Image: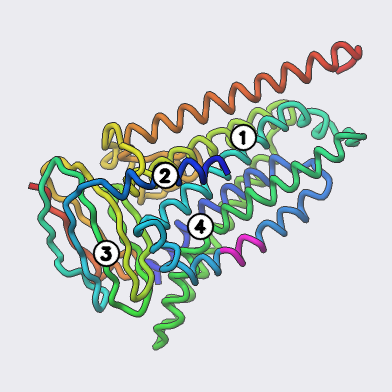
Amino acid sequence: MKFICLFALLLPFAACADDADYTLVLKDHRFQPEELIVPAGKKIKLKIENRDELAEEFESFALNREKAVAGNGSATLYIGPLEPGRYPFIGEFYEETAKGVIIAK
Amino acid sequence: MFGTAVIVFREVLEAALIIGIVAAATHGIPGSRRWLLAGLLAGLAGAGLVAAFTDAIGALADGIGQELFNAIVLGIAVMMLAWHNIWMSSHGAALAAGARAIGGDIRAGRRECSVLLLIVGLAVLREGSETVLFLYGIAASGNGQSSMLFGGLLGMALGIATGYLIYAGLLRVPLRWFFTATSVLVLLLAAGMASQSAHFLIQADLLPSLAAPLWDTSAALPENGIPGMLLHSLIGYDSRPAGMQLVFYIIALVAIGAGMKLATQAHKEKHSTQGEV
């Protein structure tokens, strides 16, 4: 219960954070765009829109992020601030086609 | 097929290791097997529900519902593991010696069993829901996917076998070391979960990362290799952790460790005044 209260208290902070927004779209188990360029040194709000029927799991070891996205659903997560560089990511469930890279400049 | 096996193995491994360790740790408690099984079944049912409502959960709280959910589930699991370890510090020795639980200890034993149910149930719930999503996807997409389904089952079997190995291995540890071994493992499991819970809160932007990453050992010990995977599940290894994760890890270690020490001391004092151990 205490935990839930703590989270409830923390929620407004998340809501008012002012971050750059980027979107990745999943279609036919491919990401669009496959190369996403983002500014380095800034926290980024990343939205993943899954336009496939089936669920996918966005995963990046380089970014240390993992998140399930339901079929025809979307998900939001925060990454960074990043050092300049390349950060590959995959859709874990359909790894052969669902892959891309985030480039921080 | 191989890819499928690896994905499912990864998801099943963590829950299987947790169950293997707590099953060994509660080996001597009467009725613990039944509670463990109940936890497993409840966890599976919960995993199905969570998988079915992935989108609804994810959409909560401005799209960070999944992180909140995971962080809360992990937080509860950490508290349950802490309770278990502290309880074991005062009751464990008697149980292992085969002493009958008497009087109030029976009630305490029952409470310990419900904690066991929660720990197992939550582990299966969290790790199982992604496996359900994945396997459902394979099943739903139909055409000629039987080799993938076989891969999934293979991964699941391998994960469960690893959990069983750690269980059987722990039971072979001599009694003298048994408590130290199981309580150290449970302590590290709890600390690892605390770190993961911080990780989810950072991903949801509810906590600052402090330093991200604090170190990068992904070249030497990648998390998608077998050793990295095992260490991740067992002690919460992270190849690129945020500073906040380490803070949570250390707080969990110190707090639970202190609780165990206090419980052991209280137990010793109580028994030395009664003139027996």
- Let me know if marks 2 and 3 both belong to one chain: no
Chain letter of mark 1 equals B
Label 2: how many residues lie within 10 Å, few (<14), some (14-19) or many (20+)? few
Instruction: Say left or right for B267 vs A24.
Output: right
| Front tag of 3 and 4 | 3
As measured in the structure, the alpha-carbon distance from the residue carrying label 2 to the one carrying label 3 is 31 Å
User: At x 25% / y 46%, what residue is drawn?
Assistant: A17
Label 3: how many residues lie within 10 Å, few (<14), some (14-19) or many (20+)? many
As measured in the structure, the alpha-carbon distance from the residue carrying label 3 to the one carrying label 1 is 36 Å
| Front tag of 1 and 4 | 1
Residue designated by label 4: B127
Kind of residue sitting beneath label 4 = Glu
Element type at marker 1? Answer: helix
Kind of residue sitting beneath label 2 = Pro
Is residue B52 found inside the magenta-colored segment of the image?
Answer: no
The quarter of the rendered structure image containing the C terminus of chain B is top right
Element type at marker 3? Answer: strand
User: At x 48% / y 65%, what residue is drawn?
Assistant: B131
Residue that protrudes farthest toward the left in the picture: A105
Residue designated by label 1: B82
Element type at marker 4? Answer: helix
